[in-house]
Image (cartoon, rainbow, N blue to C red):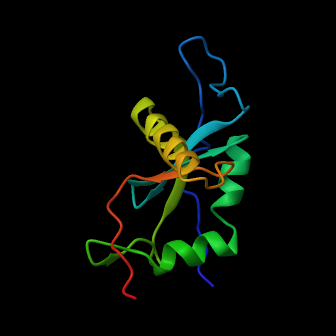
């Protein structure tokens, strides 16, 4: 089983007023970086919850089978970390949540890939 190992210091999510930035649902937006490349933006209640999510087996398995431009999104020796999202990354999640809602899909766990994802062969 592949394990995601956070690197670097614990990320901080602060705005100019030095308060935690949360949306109306009480969620903050975080980014999963793989080998220092922003890959996926997603919402979580805290940085601890965000780090826990990227360690869930289903999450690791999904990323490990995906490809971007023919390359694996997550390899067995890749280094991962979670950090606070930038405004453009927050907007990507908000847009994806809106698209999911328009399609009648669940919007509780909205996320947005920040890299192109290859279509899986049928």
Where residue 89 appears, as percent x and y from the top left, is 44, 39
- Tell me if residue 76 can be seen: no
Q: Give the quadrant of residue 4.
A: bottom right
Q: Find residue 116 and report its horizontal and vertical position in percent.
A: 32, 61
Of all residues shown, which one is farthest toward the bottom?
A: 122
92 or 21, which lies in front?
Answer: 92
Q: What residue do we see at 66% from left, 74% from top?
A: 58
Which residue sits furthest left?
Answer: 69
Is residue 57 toward the left or the right of residue 33 in the image?
right
- Horizontal and vertical percent position of residue 106: 66, 54
Foreground residue, 101 or 28? 101
Q: Residue at x 35, y 75 (%)?
A: 119
Task: Assign the N terminus to one quadrant of the image.
Answer: bottom right
Residue 28 visible somewhere in the drawing: yes
Which of these two is toward me, 27 or 9?
A: 27
- The residue at 46%/40% (across/down) is 95
Residue in the picture at 64% in, 48% down: 107
Q: Above or below — where is 8 with respect to 58?
A: above
Count of marks overlaid on the render = 0
Relative side of 112 to 17, left or right? left
Residue farthest toward the top in the current orientation of the protein: 17
């Amino acid at each position: 089983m592949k394990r995601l190992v956070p690197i670097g210091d614990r990320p901080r999510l602060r705005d100019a007023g030095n308060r935690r930035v949360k949306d109306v649902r009480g969620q903050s937006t975080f980014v999963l970086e793989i080998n220092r490349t922003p890959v996926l933006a997603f919402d979580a209640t805290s940085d601890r919850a965000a780090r826990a999510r990227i360690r869930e087996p289903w999450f690791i398995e999904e990323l490990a089978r995906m490809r971007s431009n023919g390359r694996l999104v997550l390899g067995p020796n890749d280094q991962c970390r979670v950090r606070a999202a930038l405004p453009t990354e927050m907007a990507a999640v908000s847009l994806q949540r809106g698209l999911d809602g328009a399609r009648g899909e669940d919007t509780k766990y909205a996320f947005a890939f920040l890299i192109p994802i290859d279509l899986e062969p049928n």
